[in-house]
Image (cartoon, rainbow, N blue to C red):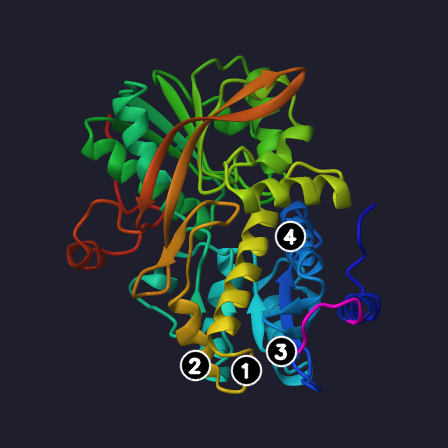
Amino acid sequence: MAWKTNRRDFMAGAAATALLGAPALADAAPVKVGLLTVKTGPLAQGGIQMEQGLALLLRDRGGTLAGRKAEMISADTGGSPAGAKTKAQELVERENVDFIVGPLAAFELLAITDYIAQAKVPLLSLAAADDMTQRKPNPFFIRASSTSSQCNHPLGEYAAKDMNLKRVATISEDFAFGYEQAGGFQRVFEDNGGKITLKLWPPLVTADYTPYLAQIQDVDGVWNGFAGSNPVKFNRQYVDAGLKFPRLGGWTAYDDALLKSFGDEALGAISAHWYSPDVATESNKRFVAGMAKEYEVLPGGYSAGCYVNGMCIEAALQKTGGKTDDKQALIDALRQVSLQDTPRGPLRFDHLGNVVGNVFIRRLDRKDGKLVNTIVKTYPDVSQFWTYDEAKYLATPVYSRDAAPVKI
């Protein structure tokens, strides 16, 4: 049965588990973790999973982090930049949170980054905007999931070298996350001899992809970077349009939490992800079992990302002795976190606050009557700069809508 993330209920449960023996710092106020998520619109499915992941981490820890009681305060941004900024201000100025986890979308993150830097509250986000840890780093930000382009760099190499694809079309939503995903894939794919012959940009809210699908021809593969519930619509319409080119996608395109919504139309799709339910770590086994028990779902990156963020907060608090008053010490401790056993495998952070960790290439199969993503290759210790020289990488502009032309 799903646990309702009601603040009063959570505190009651946390207090009860503390009385049963969970360690606590005497008379200390709870550690407050504010969650910026989204529960309405096309991104809501991922936002709800974010809340589930962080809630499960706190439940697993008996309502405490590093010896202190812990409280989660969830705020719905509505999936808009203005909503994200308003809710961030409420969490900081009204709720006095010690950490913020979230938001989900890159455009939400970009709307709050200046405020977060000014407020000096450590922010751990799933939002993948590349420049947050590249050309415009925020000193109070870390990211334990990936940049938009990070998983798509190895996918570009895999498409060219392992799949032997030569000509690929790309399609993704017309906003920053789509641009940066596609840009990362295109750069590495073309550096390995491939060609991107067509780039399509439907709006975030698109009911009918048929006009875009009708343009896809004379290719041997189609990459997509859809997120939220849009991958379900895209894959159904892709098959309905009679297209049979192999499909590839970024981590949101074939995330495991979506599999219950897919049918056979998605079989065979290849995706690159920083998380997979079959990662063989002890913490991932517990995490997958916990998500099944509490929410009756197979977890994907949205819930895993927030669970891992909670683990990073816990590890940082252990470094500070549970103290949260010095915000600079908190973010310094977060950036020094290095964990071996997490649901995504080992991780550490680079000097800009972005994760270095494994990326998994997966194939969507049907096993025992269920859709599953099968890991077919693992790229270890993937940096946000891939194999490129960091200084040269940062000297070029961030991946954008028209940063690189198509090759006919």
Can the viewer see residue 96? yes
Please state the horizontal and vertical placement of residue 130, each as a whole percent of the image: 37, 56
C-alpha gap between disc 4 and disc 2: 26 Å
The residue at which mark 4 appears reads as: 53
Give the mark nearer the N terminus: 4 vs 3.
4
User: Label 2 neighbourhood size at 10 Å, few (<14), some (14-19), many (20+)?
Assistant: some
- Given residues 42 and 306, the one toward you in this image is 306
Badge 4 marks a residue whose secondary structure is helix
What kind of residue is marked 3?
Val
Please state the horizontal and vertical placement of residue 256, each as a whole percent of the image: 59, 34
Give the mark nearer the N terminus: 1 vs 2.
1
Apparent side of residue 303 relative to residue 126 in the rendered image (left or right):
right
Badge 2 marks a residue whose secondary structure is helix
The residue stretch that appears in magenta: 19-24
- Given residues 366 and 168, the one toward you in this image is 366
Picture disc at residue 97: 3
- Magenta stretch: dominant SS? loop
Give the mark nearer the N terminus: 1 vs 4.
4
Name the residue: 60% across, 61% down. Answer: 80
